[in-house]
Amino acid sequence: MKKLIIIILTLMSLVACEQSSQSRQQFTIDRSLPKEQAMITSVPLPAKEHFTASISVPKQIKSNEVFILEATLKNVSDRDLTILHASGVFYFSIKDSNGKGVNTFVMKEVGIQHPIQSKGIITERYEYRIDNPGICEVSAIAKFSLGEGDNFKEVETDKGNIEVVLVN
């Protein structure tokens, strides 16, 4: 009988602990804004945004001809910073006029620490060749962590268009 009482008390305490942690977790989730709401708001970007990104895109290329995209990440803050990123900072995207991805972009996920001075830039180049004529949309996203920890950032460039002309 004593064993049964001990088992029942143990189970009750486990259930009570589980309910307690669920309510704390729910409280934490309820306090934060959903990501979709935060992006919809028209509040200006916080002063903590330290970076801008841009991309250089040729206006016209010939099909089957290698061309170069150049993306730049700029530290617009007044202090030197250190970022942690994969083997490159930028992930490049090329889509055809139907929105279908044209390129496959893969990068090794190694941790590279890269200091970037105040008003300094990091520029990366990407070479590619497009076979089919048409208009393609090009962009790049810088993915990195600022300092140490979970301070992950994504900074996207504007989108640019390339006209791919058929070569006879």
Image: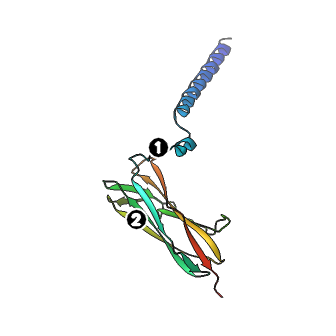
Eye-nearest disc, 1 or 2: 1
Q: Look at the image and tell me in which quarter the N terminus lies.
A: top right
Depth order, front residue of 149/128: 128
How is the model colour-coded?
rainbow
Residue drawn at the location 62% of the way across and 72% of the way down: 135
Name the disc covering residue 122, or none: 2
Residue at coordinates 57% horizontally, 79% vertically from top-left? 61
Q: Secondary structure at mark 2?
A: strand
**Label ID, residue 83:** none
**Amino acid carrying mark 1 in the image:** Val
- What is the distance, in whole Å, between disc 1 and disc 2 at their CAs? 28 Å
Q: Position of residue 150 (x, y in %)?
A: 46, 47
Q: For the C terminus, which image quadrant?
A: bottom right
Q: Which residue is mark 1?
A: 43
Is residue 164 positioned above or below 111 on the image? below
The reply to whether callout 1 and callout 2 are in contact (CB within 8 Å) is: no
The answer to which image quadrant residue 20 occupies is: top right
Q: Position of residue 158 (x, y in %)?
A: 51, 62
Q: Is residue 92 visible?
A: no
Q: Is residue 113 left or right of residue 2?
A: left
Whether residue 3 sits left or right of residue 25 in the image: it is right
The image shows residue 28 at horizontal and vertical percentages of: 52, 32
Number of other residues with Cα within 10 Å of mark 2, as a class: few under 14, some 14 to 19, many 20 or more: some
Measured along the vertical axis of the image, is residue 107 above or below residue 133?
above
Q: On screen, 150 above or below 68?
A: above
Toward the top, the furthest residue is: 1
Q: Residue at x 61, y 81 (%)?
A: 64
Helix, strand or loop for disc 1: loop
> Between 6 and 82, which is closer to the camera in this rendering?
82
Q: Nearer the viewer, residue 148 or 11?
A: 148
Would you say 63 lies left or right of 47 here? right
- Amino acid type indicated by mark 2: Ile
